[in-house]
Image: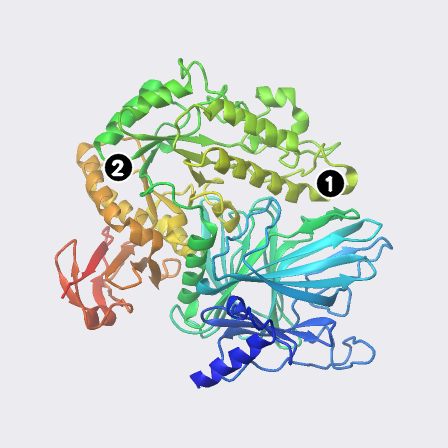
């Protein structure tokens, strides 16, 4: 069988270019069958060129030893077809990209209004090519290609609109991920209007699927939901100008029988931080169409002759080993292809001032915080809101990015240098995209805010949104932060964004481009992020939007971690971190220990939850009980032993805290030499329950010692399960196991 597979691959490779087959292994063109085959370590994706005009979707799933199925020609009444080939009906076929008004009555990927006023859209195949790496996407974040990654570019043409469409597929072999985006070029003499744009379409066979999504609200983000798909269209979306607390742009589509460890599961995500649309439609043809992109409700684009529009990148993965396998594919992809390279050997354990003193900061308070933080082993002090302009509360100062001279008498630079002499790093909070009406910036430039002529602008948290589509605004912010931070030795920036976009209009854009304001806003935000990364390459960025309101791959391209939620209650954080793990690695989760009171057991409980991600603290250490504070150095010492495993290890979920009163999971390295197992009970149980924590990745022939208790377990015992007993009354059982394989 293996010899047969090798021979098939060899024959396919010869059809591309005889001397370059080895370099093109990830993308193979089978000229005989007019098929393009995209291959990752464990999956295949197959496209067929139908009658040299259309792109048929053939297969996406595990590698097959006996070849992929034939393209499914389906025929039905009431389904339009082209004269001369009755066997291709757009409404019945599985296709790669679908077009509005052109015979496909399902949700479609692209809608373009031509100069003749018609929005009927249709593109036909012209050519394709394969190249190493990833084509750049102008002004947008996208995944970095590795040495073995290749890209397929397919060119299509529409003679009516005189537009050229290019579809891109980049294959990230070792991650089992394929990315998708499109580029539209107006090669005619008249402008056209893009009215709907999706980056990814994937037609799946069958209807027995569940849809996994992450829903919520401010303070309760990314909660797990799994519901059966039904006939018709189901969607997730954001109309808020951000990827939002309400729906994350991740979607999982899995077989009804799929579990955490078994069964087929597809995953889809969007490398974008603004409004979006994700659709799953089960139709008459007994298939499921999945789409992800900008949509059309909060997006439009005026494309003049000669202009090019590029969509954000979307990504997809397939796992035959359940939901957990899908997650681990996305975790590896995000760590290896999205996140910035690590700046420091260790991520700093921060002490953030917000929940301790809010706006009430000055040099003395911050100096006291720094001295005590160093005493207890904390790496960094983060000065949150309240340091700039006339900022005494949330009603003034946003937009005036200069240090308050009353609070910092010798300037910010002198103060930070003084703080760092205590041996602690220094971080600072900013909210660049916002402005208070009570600010020097707004008084000088009210036209620099998002607003619609003739309509009253609405406030949220006493602030308006700056028009980031206007290059003058972005340049002002660059100059402001250059003046504020250019000679200040900061180590870390917490970038916040505390309201959604309403009255989305721009004084900068002409009337025919007003529908572009939302997307152009994000392009301006990304321009500013890139400037920060280039201007301050040694400064770590933590992203925040009222917590996890922009917890997405677009933000992760520029920020090492994201504040997971403004809700630091450990019960809710356990659920939020569980949901986040469906699509994102633990290395992206900023998790703080907060408000432990005077109970040493409570700070240990909260640490156990926070150690599921990147550790930090958010509390007033100036007035806390010493017996509680004395727990912090030991917690940090343990976390440092585990940090690399948490950042880079494989992650396995054992129980769902959104469905049960406890959560459990573990991290392990690739060799299975170290396993970090966690169990957290969220509330007291009325009855004792015995629960088995099965560590299926343990080497059954090895012996493991718990470094925390010195207890010993055989690998076979760990596979069968460690038994834990839940607490009753006011007791919540929690524990961690640091399991180290014994050396022979």
Residue 322 % position (x, y):
42, 70
Quick one: 410 or 256, which is closer to the camera? 410
Give the x, y percent position of residue 551: 48, 48
- Residue identifier under label 2: 597
* Label whose residue precedes the other's in the sequence (1 or 2): 1
Q: How is the image coloured?
A: rainbow
Q: In the image, is 64 to the left or to the right of 507?
A: left
* Residue 449 shows in this picture: no
Q: Classify mark 2: helix, strand or loop.
A: loop
Q: Residue at 46% x, 52% y: name it.
A: 222
Q: Residue furthest right?
A: 116
Q: Secondary structure at mark 1?
A: helix
- In this view, 413 is above or below 584: above
Residue 223 sits in quarter: bottom left
Residue 530 x %, y % = 53, 39
Image height check: is 29 above or below 542?
below
Whether 27 is drawn above or below 616: the answer is below
Mark linked to residue 418? none
Image-quadrant location for residue 286:
bottom right
Tell me which residue sits at (32%, 47%) in the image. 610
């Amino acid at each position: 069988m293996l010899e047969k597979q090798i021979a098939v691959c060899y024959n396919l490779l010869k059809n591309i270019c005889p001397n370059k087959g080895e370099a093109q292994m990830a993308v193979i063109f089978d000229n005989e069958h007019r098929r393009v085959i995209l291959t990752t370590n464990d999956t295949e994706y197959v496209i067929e060129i139908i009658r040299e005009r259309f792109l048929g979707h053939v297969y996406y799933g595990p590698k097959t030893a006996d070849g992929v199925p034939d393209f499914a020609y389906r025929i039905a009444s009431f389904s339009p077809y082209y004269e001369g080939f009755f066997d291709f009906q757009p409404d019945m076929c599985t296709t790669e990209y679908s077009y509005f008004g052109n015979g496909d009555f399902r949700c479609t990927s692209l809608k373009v209004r031509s100069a003749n006023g018609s929005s009927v859209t249709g593109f036909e195949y012209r050519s394709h090519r394969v190249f190493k790496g990833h084509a750049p996407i102008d002004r947008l974040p996208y995944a970095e290609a590795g040495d073995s990654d290749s890209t397929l570019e397919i060119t299509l043409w529409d003679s009516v609109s005189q537009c050229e469409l290019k579809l891109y597929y980049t294959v990230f072999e070792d991650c089992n991920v394929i990315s998708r985006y499109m580029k539209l070029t107006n090669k005619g003499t008249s402008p056209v209007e893009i009215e709907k744009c999706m980056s990814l379409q994937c037609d799946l066979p069958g209807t027995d699927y569940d849809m996994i999504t992450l829903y919520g609200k401010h303070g309760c983000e990314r909660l797990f939901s799994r519901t059966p798909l039904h006939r018709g269209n189901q969607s997730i979306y954001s109309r808020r100008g951000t990827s939002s607390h309400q729906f994350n742009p991740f979607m999982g589509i899995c077989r009804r029988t799929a579990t955490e460890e078994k069964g087929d599961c597809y995953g889809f995500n969007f490398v974008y931080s603004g409004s979006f649309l994700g659709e799953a439609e089960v139709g008459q043809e007994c298939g499921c169409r999945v789409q992800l992109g900008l949509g059309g409700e909060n997006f439009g684009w005026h494309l003049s002759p000669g202009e090019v529009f590029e969509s954000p990148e979307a990504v997809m993965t397939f796992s035959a080993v359940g939901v957990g396998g899908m997650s681990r594919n996305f975790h590896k992809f995000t760590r290896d292809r999205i996140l910035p390279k690590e700046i420091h050997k260790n991520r700093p354990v921060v002490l953030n001032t917000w929940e301790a003193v809010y706006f009430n900061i000055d040099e003395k308070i911050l100096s006291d915080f720094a001295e005590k933080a160093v005493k207890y082993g904390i790496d960094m002090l983060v000065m949150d809101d309240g340091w700039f302009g006339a900022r005494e509360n949330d009603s003034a100062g946003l937009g005036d990015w200069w240090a308050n001279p009353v609070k910092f008498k010798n300037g910010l630079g002198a103060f930070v240098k003084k703080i760092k002499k205590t041996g602690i790093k220094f971080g600072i909070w900013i909210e660049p995209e916002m402005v208070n009406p009570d600010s020097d910036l707004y008084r000088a430039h009210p036209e620099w805010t998002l607003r619609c002529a003739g309509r009253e602008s609405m406030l949220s948290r006493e602030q308006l949104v700056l028009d980031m589509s206007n290059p003058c605004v972005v340049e002002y912010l660059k100059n402001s932060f250059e003046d504020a931070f250019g000679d200040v030795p900061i180590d870390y920036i917490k970038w916040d964004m505390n309201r959604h976009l309403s009255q989305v209009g721009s004084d900068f854009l002409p009337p025919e481009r007003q529908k572009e304001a939302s997307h152009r806003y994000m392009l301006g935000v990304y321009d500013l992020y890139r400037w920060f990364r280039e201007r301050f390459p040694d400064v770590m960025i933590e992203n925040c939007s009222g917590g996890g309101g922009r917890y997405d791959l677009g933000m992760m391209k520029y920020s090492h971690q994201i504040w997971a939620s403004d809700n630091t209650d450990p019960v809710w954080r356990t659920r939020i971190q569980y949901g986040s793990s469906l699509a994102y690695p633990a290395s992206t989760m900023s998790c703080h220990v907060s408000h432990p009171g005077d109970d040493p057991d409570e700070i240990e409980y909260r640490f156990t939850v926070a150690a599921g991600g990147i550790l930090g603290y958010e509390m007033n250490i100036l007035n806390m009980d010493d017996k509680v504070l004395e727990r912090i150095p030991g917690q940090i010492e343990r976390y440092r032993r585990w940090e690399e495993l948490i950042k880079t290890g494989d992650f396995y979920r054992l129980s769902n805290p959104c469905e049960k009163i406890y959560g459990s999971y573990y991290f392990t390295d690739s060799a299975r030499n170290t396993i970090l197992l966690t169990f957290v009970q969220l509330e007291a149980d009325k009855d004792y329950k015995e629960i088995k924590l099965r560590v299926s990745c343990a080497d059954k022939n090895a012996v493991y010692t718990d470094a925390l208790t010195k207890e010993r377990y055989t690998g076979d015992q760990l596979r069968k399960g460690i038994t834990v007993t839940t607490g009753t009354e006011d007791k919540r059982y929690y524990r961690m196991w640091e399991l180290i394989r014994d050396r022979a």
